[in-house]
Amino acid sequence: MGDIVDVAREQVLEQGIGLSQEQLVEVLQTPDDRLPELLALAHEVRVKWCGEEIEVEGIISLKTGGCPEDCHFCSQSGQFTSPVRAVWLNIPELVQAAQETAATGATEFCIVAAVRGPDARLMSQVKAGIEAINAAVEINIACSLGMLTQEQVDELKAMGVHRYNHNLESARSYFPDVVTTHSFEERWDTCLMVRESGMELCCGGLVGMGESLEQRAELAAQLAELEPHEVPLNFLNPRPGTPFGDMEVMDGKDALRTIAAFRLAMPRTVLRYAGGRELTLGDLGTRDGLLGGINAVIVGNYLTTLGRPATADLDLLAELKMPVKELQKTL
């Protein structure tokens, strides 16, 4: 294992070249006694190629629940018995959520809808929401509305959407075990259109869904190929009523190895803590990850699960002397 750490130090830290899929498998096999060394290297890589700052983001769900897709990890699917009902947020609530997010120091506010892709009604509601937010508060606006057509990509770009989130969810080889109502290629195509439009692409996935280490490395390599601006890394939080509801929570050390591997695959990418970290890592692990390659966090609650209080994350960043990125309005 000493070899892969030495190779990564030269290849990634010194040259800025991400590790290959085969090399990432070796990283994911790091023995526990070498984990602190691996995390320290990932932190060095992050500071060198991304800088010291941590980006903070809040998310709000415009439409929760009732989604027609069957993503096996998600309690928002209308196909499962998960206790999430379909609701729509009204515009004043959206603006209030954006203001509360900005008050935490967050630079990014993401509007999310649990849909296969947006229809005309949703697109018009998003447009009205963005206009109202921009009139009330200064914050970058991102969207996550499912799979898009080229026309919808162009519309969102014209609305001033700064960043679009569309996760790969899992590696191509494991995808059919996770979702059957759409294909990996459909997700990939949306990501390519977003990237080519000039919007920032936010594209990540979930780990701890029963995939092999090789498939975890495959996901990191496929994300690296897409070259997203940001990669949210989610850890499965098994939700009652979903096909993955009875899965074991991912081991904390495996989660930290995964964080380091993703950083070593993508040295210049914003790597964001997303869902499931409270359960998988807890407070201590959250600290270790921030010192192991992470350079962005989602504060507050997620779409269907409670997160750590925003103040807890902001206090931890202050304690670790990690500067929160100043808001740079790019709309």
Image: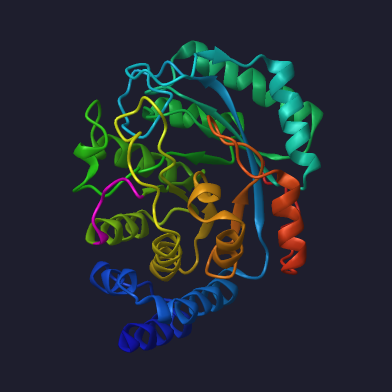
| Residue plotted at (35% across, 46% down) | 248
Image position, residue 207 (x, y; %)? 36, 50
| The quadrant where residue 218 appears | bottom left
Q: In the rendered view, how is the structure colored?
A: rainbow
Image position, residue 329 (x, y; %)? 72, 46
For the N terminus, the image quarter is bottom left
| The quadrant where residue 93 appears | top right
Q: Over which residues does the magenta segment extend?
A: 208-213
The number of discs equals 0
Q: 7 or 291: nearer the eye?
A: 291
On the picture, is 319 further left or further right than 4? right
| The quadrant where residue 17 appears | bottom left
Image position, residue 298 (x, y; %)? 61, 46
Q: 164 or 199: nearer the eye?
A: 164
| Residue plotted at (57% across, 36% down) | 302
Q: Is residue 173 magenta?
A: no
Our reading of the magenta stretch's main secondary structure is loop
On the picture, is 103 further left or further right than 159? right
| Residue plotted at (59% across, 70% down) | 291
Above/below status of 179 relative to 290: above
On the picture, is 263 further left or further right than 132? left
On the picture, is 60 further left or further right than 184? right
Q: Is residue 211 magenta?
A: yes
